[in-house]
Amino acid sequence: MIRRRPGRAAVLLLAAAALGTDLSAAARQGEVAHDLVYEGARVIDPETGLDAVRNIAVDGDRIAAVSEAALKGRRMIDARGLVAAPGFIDIHSHATTREAARYQAKDGVTTRLELEIGTWPVPAWYDAKQGRELLNYGSSAGHTALRYFIQKGEGAAGLAALRDPMEKFGAKEADAPLSDAAAQRLDILLDQGIREGAIGIGSGTQYTPGITRREMLDVTEVAAKTATCLFTHIRYGSLVEPDSAFEALQENIANAAVTGACVHVAHINSMAMRDAPFMATLMRKARGRGVDITTETYPWGGSVDAVRSHFFDPGWEQRWGVGVGDLQSRRTGKRLTQAAFDAMRAGTGDDGVIMHMNGEATIAALLKDSSVLVASDGGRIEGPNGHPRSAGTFAHLLGHYVREAGTLGLVGALRKITLMPAQRLEAFVPAMKRKGRLQPGMDADIVLFDPQTVGTRATYGDAARYSDGFRYVMVNGVLIVDGGALVEGVNPGRPVYSKYKS
């Protein structure tokens, strides 16, 4: 990983730190100007509990000082009235385009990670992004993509078939179990991908019915042996037994207990619906017994689905706890009628829908649970009828659930999107030890927002809207949002790897 050489100010500050000298005092004594100083911000650092007005100095790609004393910078930014926090870490993002990154930057995101589905081959994914990214980036090794690659015979044919791993859900190979030889090959290549830098293993299990329970146990064992983590879209999303979300979660708890692996369950809100708070409690009890399992939610009541997928096989209304009128076309923005649903199910055109499955009470209960992270599950920006989570997850959390509804406090909300994801990953992702904190020596991924105006403009039916309130967003010491405006021509995003490549 290439880093800029520290400037004179950074060298003096690091030397002062080594001698036990106050960093800001050292800067004043030498009349050193930092690269940039934010003056008078309300600094919130979830790890130390700091919540006070401070000045922040940045040198190169690191935070040089967080001080009550005046600091001198070559650029001085008046941050009075703004909250300064560590940059937001989105551990569940399928967004891949530059356009999507711009929306995320305006939503306070500084690191976006594709961990639920992942990618294959791993080096090619990282190489394609080197020097081209607005945000820090990383991926897991894709279980579902890799098994498809193996089933296609590997080699050039398998690689040509991959492209976007998410395109392969619904392919006939996804419905087929692996042979013993293919299963052994899967484990070998997953291990290889992690050692090439992938952040654990991502599995879109529900989308791939051919994944047997034995295969999931073996894949979880690979996560355990590499001391990384399995990030999983669990096997079932259903309120009805058999094949319920409850059973799927129990499978993952059992696999984590048997193997000793870290397991992270994606978006429990959209898998367990109104039972999601109970599922979060179940995981919390398992952790109390030493099982390493966690989960996340996004703060929206709707999920994104495809009408021709097996999710909508007969009986779907009972499984999901919704009806046809709860489905909204992603093409037209209109709620479906039975006739429209039937035509979409039988047709060949765009079958994407937003399913409005969760009420405010469910989302609020998950957000109040101190063990539940917040992530977006966002994707590409696909016009006004896409899901607003792709553009406004974190602003919605801070604007609606903190300021308007009072569901949780500001410090607690920021913890869910900064420190908690960093701590979940840092045991096997060294870069995360420098993220999610606003302290001297940490990476200069910093967000400053107005707590009175922060909020999302993105809504269902008008999803392609930038969030409000974010005045400055910095990635590795480079401003990507400056005075509320996106900065053009910068690519400060850096790769985030597992411990095997860092």
Image (spheres, grey):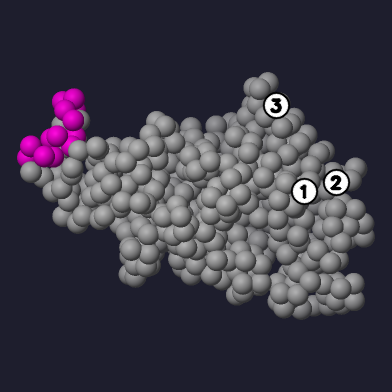
As shown in the figure, which amino acid type bears the numbered disc 2?
Leu
First of labels 2, 1 by sequence position: 2
Q: Residue at x 71, y 58 (%)?
A: 302
Q: Residue at x 57, y 62 (%)?
A: 390
| Residue 367 lies in the magenta stretch | no
Residue 286: which disc? 3
As shown in the figure, which amino acid type bears the numbered disc 1?
Met
Q: Is residue 136 visible?
A: no
Which residue is disc 1 drawn over? Answer: 273
Choose between 329 and 424: the one closer to the eye.
329
Choose between 190 and 88: the one closer to the eye.
88
Classify mark 1: helix, strand or loop.
helix
Classify mark 2: helix, strand or loop.
loop
Which residue is disc 2 drawn over? Answer: 239
- Residue most extreme to the right: 314
Q: Is residue 366 visible?
A: yes
Marks 3 and 2, how far apart at CA:
21 Å
| Residue 285 at x, y percent in the picture | 70, 26
| Residue 166 at x, y percent in the picture | 65, 61
Residue span colored magenta: 18-30
Q: Quadrant of residue 440?
A: top left
